[in-house]
Image: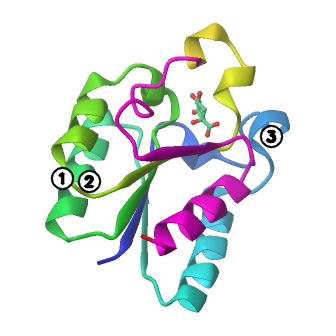
Amino acid sequence: GPIYVLNGPNLNLLGLREPEIYGHDTLDDIAGMLEDRARELGLEIDLRQSNHEGHLVDWLHEAQARRAKAVLLNAGAFTHSSIAIHDAIKAVTTPVIEVHLSNPHRREEFRHISYVGRAAKGTIAGFGAQSYMLALEAAARF
Ligand code: DQA
């Protein structure tokens, strides 16, 4: 199945939002880069964004139902708060890769806990838009 690329709160503002931390690429720019590389790899991308926690839970369930090859998940700030997303990752057999543009460990204390990371197969963080590309390369080898 496809590779789901799920994005959480405020990532719709990527490119405009704190560009010194998150860079100037928009989520559409990242979607374009992922699609180009996915095409080369013979993979299909399904990229979505929501500011609502439950949508991310629903989409994790959907990824499993659609037999997604993997989920790349940037849960934004829900990373640090959402036991529901943690449990959804545990509930599905689809491999989930945690993705962050920034390196949360270099930032505020409240970003040092990741409920996503405690359930995910692995994490790629700190490489800006390239974090998504590296996660795609990892997923391609699953
Ligand atoms: C983020 C890091 C989170 O701490 C933050 O709340 C975000 C973006 C990242 O991609 O670096 O919204 O997930």
Name the element at disc 2: helix
Residue found farthest to the top: 109
- Quote the CA–CA distance across marks 3 and 1: 32 Å
* Horizontal side of residue 117 vs 131, given as left or right: left
Which badge, 3 or 2, comes first in the chain's sequence?
3
For the N terminus, the image quarter is bottom left
Three-letter residue code for mark 3: Pro
Mark 3 packing: few (<14 Cα in 10 Å), some, or many (20+)? Answer: few
The question of residue 137 being in magenta is answered with: yes
- Quote the CA–CA distance across marks 3 and 2: 28 Å
Q: Is residue 99 visible?
A: no
For the C terminus, the image quarter is bottom left
Residue found farthest to the right: 20
* Horizontal side of residue 51 vs 111, given as left or right: left
Q: Can you identify the residue that label 1 sits on?
A: 61
Q: Residue at x 85, y 36 (%)?
A: 20
Name the element at disc 1: helix
**Extent of the magenta region:** 112-141
Numbered disc total: 3
* Horizontal side of residue 77 vs 116, given as left or right: right
Three-letter residue code for mark 2: Trp
Mark 2 packing: few (<14 Cα in 10 Å), some, or many (20+)? Answer: some
Q: Residue at x 67, y 23 (%)?
A: 105
Q: Are marks 1 and 2 in contact (CB under 8 Å)?
A: yes
**Quarter holding residue 28:** bottom right
Which badge, 3 or 1, comes first in the chain's sequence?
3
Q: Is residue 32 visible?
A: yes
Q: Can you identify the residue that label 2 sits on?
A: 59
Q: Are marks 3 and 1 in contact (CB under 8 Å)?
A: no
Q: Horizontal and vertical percent for residue 55?
A: 27, 45
Q: Can you identify the residue that label 3 sits on?
A: 19
Name the element at disc 3: helix
